[in-house]
């Protein structure tokens, strides 16, 4: 688990947010013109936080180490001033802040998240692109980027996770591919067990770590489930060696640890990430899912809020 935690920030946190932002943006004073972050005061930061809110990241000793603020541009939800103390930059603090911001925005019903980056900051632009943010508008000195947000479902217990899988199965048919990501113990296999129960396949559905892939035939005359564990695979070539393509059209294929690896299997797929809502050991989870490809056009995934991110 990550050593960082994230909490909401309000006007009373303005001195801390201002201090972190000034430290993180100090190197941008050489830009032409210099970053506007360096002209901010505690009062202007407090006004931002009062109007839109923000987030603060803390280390294991409860020291603040990162911050960001929310905003709206032309009515669209955005993040700005993503800042991490210099000593911890590149350690995952910014990524955790963004993950929390994306979840908060999705839970609030936002369909996308926007941000801006200077054209001069080539490395920053590359970072945001790797995080899934795509250019949508050239604003002169800076480029506006956006990321389409997934649907988010809160899952309190393991039983609820299995039930969610059963409801998801109602939307699945032969040829569908589901990619699951999440930390060890997050609930990927439990969700897959629910999918198997919903499809009516032969049990038990357990993690296929040592055999890599396992086929569960239907007991009700429906489609089989192909359950794959990609945790030990070193790349796409090793996944391709499993020859899953021979069964793709005839089965529902679920790939644990599939994010960032198994996307070439299918242009039409469901991508699901499972996150803890609290430190490890707590049952609560957030399930983020996104349907990709024309197969899912106009189809709402069962069991969610009814809102589906475009892809």
Image (tube, rainbow, N blue to C red):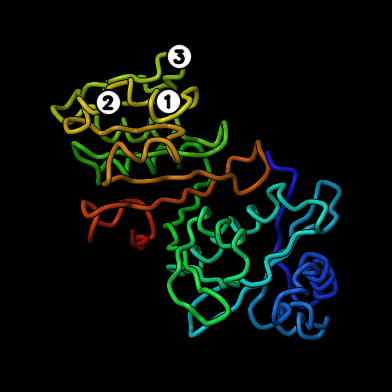
Q: Residue furthest top?
A: 210
Which residue position holds label 3?
210
- Mark 2: secondary structure: loop
Q: Is residue 68 left or right of residue 297?
A: right
Q: Residues within 10 Å of mark 1 (few under 14, many from 20)?
A: many
Identify which residue is drawn at 49% across, 61% down. 133
Question: Count of labels shown?
Answer: 3
Q: Is residue 143 left or right of residue 30?
A: left
Q: Residues within 10 Å of mark 2 (few under 14, many from 20)?
A: some
Which residue position holds label 2?
244
In the picture, the disc for residue 25 is none
- Give the x, y percent position of residue 248: 22, 31
Labels 3, 2: front one: 2
Q: Quadrant of residue 58?
A: bottom right
Q: Quadrant of the C terminus?
A: bottom left
Mark 3 or mark 1, which is nearer the start of the sequence? Answer: 3
Q: Quadrant of the N terminus?
A: top right
Mark-to-mark CA distance, 1 and 2: 12 Å
265 above or below 57?
Answer: above
- Give the x, y percent position of residue 192: 38, 33
- Mark 1: secondary structure: strand
Which residue position holds label 1?
229
């Amino acid at each position: 688990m990550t050593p960082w935690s994230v909490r909401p920030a309000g006007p009373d946190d303005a001195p801390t947010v201002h201090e972190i932002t000034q430290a993180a943006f100090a190197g941008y004073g050489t830009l032409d013109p210099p970053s506007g972050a360096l002209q901010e005061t505690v009062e202007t930061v407090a006004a931002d936080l009062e109007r839109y809110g923000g987030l603060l990241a803390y280390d294991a000793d409860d020291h603040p180490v990162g911050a960001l603020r929310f905003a709206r541009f032309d009515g669209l939800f955005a993040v700005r001033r993503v800042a991490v103390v210099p000593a911890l930059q590149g350690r995952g603090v910014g990524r955790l802040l963004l993950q929390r911001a994306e979840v908060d925005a999705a839970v609030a019903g936002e369909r996308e998240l926007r941000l801006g980056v200077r054209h001069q900051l080539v490395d920053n632009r590359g970072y945001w692109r790797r995080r899934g943010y795509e250019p949508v508008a050239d604003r002169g000195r800076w480029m506006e980027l956006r990321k389409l947000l997934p649907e988010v479902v809160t899952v309190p217990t393991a039983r609820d996770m299995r039930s969610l899988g059963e409801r998801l199965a109602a939307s699945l048919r032969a040829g569908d591919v589901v990619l699951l990501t999440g930390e060890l113990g997050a609930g990927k296999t439990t969700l897959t067990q629910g999918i198997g129960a919903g499809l009516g396949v032969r049990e038990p559905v357990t993690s296929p770590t040592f055999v890599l892939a396992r086929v569960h035939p239907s007991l009700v005359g429906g489609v089989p489930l192909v359950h794959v564990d990609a945790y030990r695979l070193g790349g796409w070539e090793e996944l391709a060696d499993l020859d899953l393509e021979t069964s793709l059209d005839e089965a529902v294929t679920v790939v644990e640890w599939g994010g960032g690896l198994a996307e070439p299997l299918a242009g039409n797929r469901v991508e699901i990430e499972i996150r803890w809502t609290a430190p490890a050991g707590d049952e609560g989870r957030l399930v983020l899912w996104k349907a990709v490809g024309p197969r899912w056009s106009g189809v709402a995934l069962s069991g969610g809020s009814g809102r589906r991110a475009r892809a």
